[in-house]
Amino acid sequence: MLLWYALSGEAIRRFEGNEAQVYDATFSPDGKRIVTASADNTARIWDVATGNTITVLKGHSGSVLSAAFSPHADRIATASADKTARVWNAEVGATVAVLNGHSGPVSSAVFGPDGERILTASDDGTARIWRVFSSAQALVDQSKVRVPRCLTLEQRKNVFLGPQPPAWCFELKKWPYQTVD
């Protein structure tokens, strides 16, 4: 892949390593990295200054059709012909989440301006908005707002949690049952 300076038509940098066609390329918000989406079922993060591969994102079972950085450049969203989108940790290249739900190839995945949502578009004729969280605590905080109560003992068992509720359940008097000693 070549990076070209649009005004002069001069090739600036060669990026080598993709094993198949590149479908998409996007700069990080600070312009120091590029993420590419490829028919080799991977996305790659590149250093713009050197042209070297920083990380290869592996996990899709079909061509990666698009890739985009989050506004803070800490995550990447990819869309794939395997009918999924993925969220990646941009620093270590690990999958954070797999977004399942489309019945056709996912052709595009982009973050919203706040980084808390991902918009995907699919060949199945749908677009979906997915809520994403920057941390487990952000998810807990959002859950407390949306579901203003704590889980029952049975609900805690169903999701493999111990019987003791978190301290905030007692503090907010949202605990619906007596604890087991």
Image: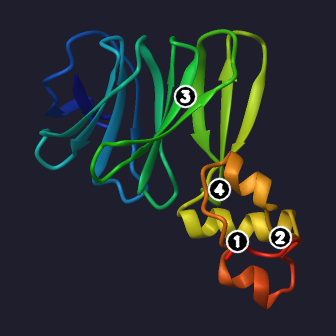
Look at the numbered discs 1 and 2 and tell me whether their residues touch, using CB distance below 8 Å: yes
Q: Which residue is mark 3?
A: 85
Q: Which residue is mark 2?
A: 145
Disc on the earlier residue, 3 or 1: 3
Helix, strand or loop for disc 2? helix
In front of the other: 170 or 128: 170
Q: Residues within 10 Å of mark 4 (few under 14, many from 20)?
A: some
Q: Which residue is mark 4?
A: 116
Marks 4/3: CA–CA distance: 15 Å
Task: Indicate which label's residue lies in the foreground, 4 or 2.
Answer: 2
Helix, strand or loop for disc 1? helix
Q: Residues within 10 Å of mark 3 (few under 14, many from 20)?
A: many
Marks 1/2: CA–CA distance: 7 Å
Determine the residue positioned at 30% across, 12% down.
Answer: 40
Give the amino acid at mark 4.
Glu
In front of the other: 152 or 73: 152
Give the answer, above or below, for where 171 lies relative to 130. below
Quarter the N terminus occupies:
top left
**Residue 6 can be seen, yes or no:** no
Give the amino acid at mark 1.
Asp
Helix, strand or loop for disc 3? strand
Quarter of the image where one finds residue 45? top left
The disc label shown at residue 141, or none: 1
Determine the residue positioned at 59% across, 39% down.
Answer: 110
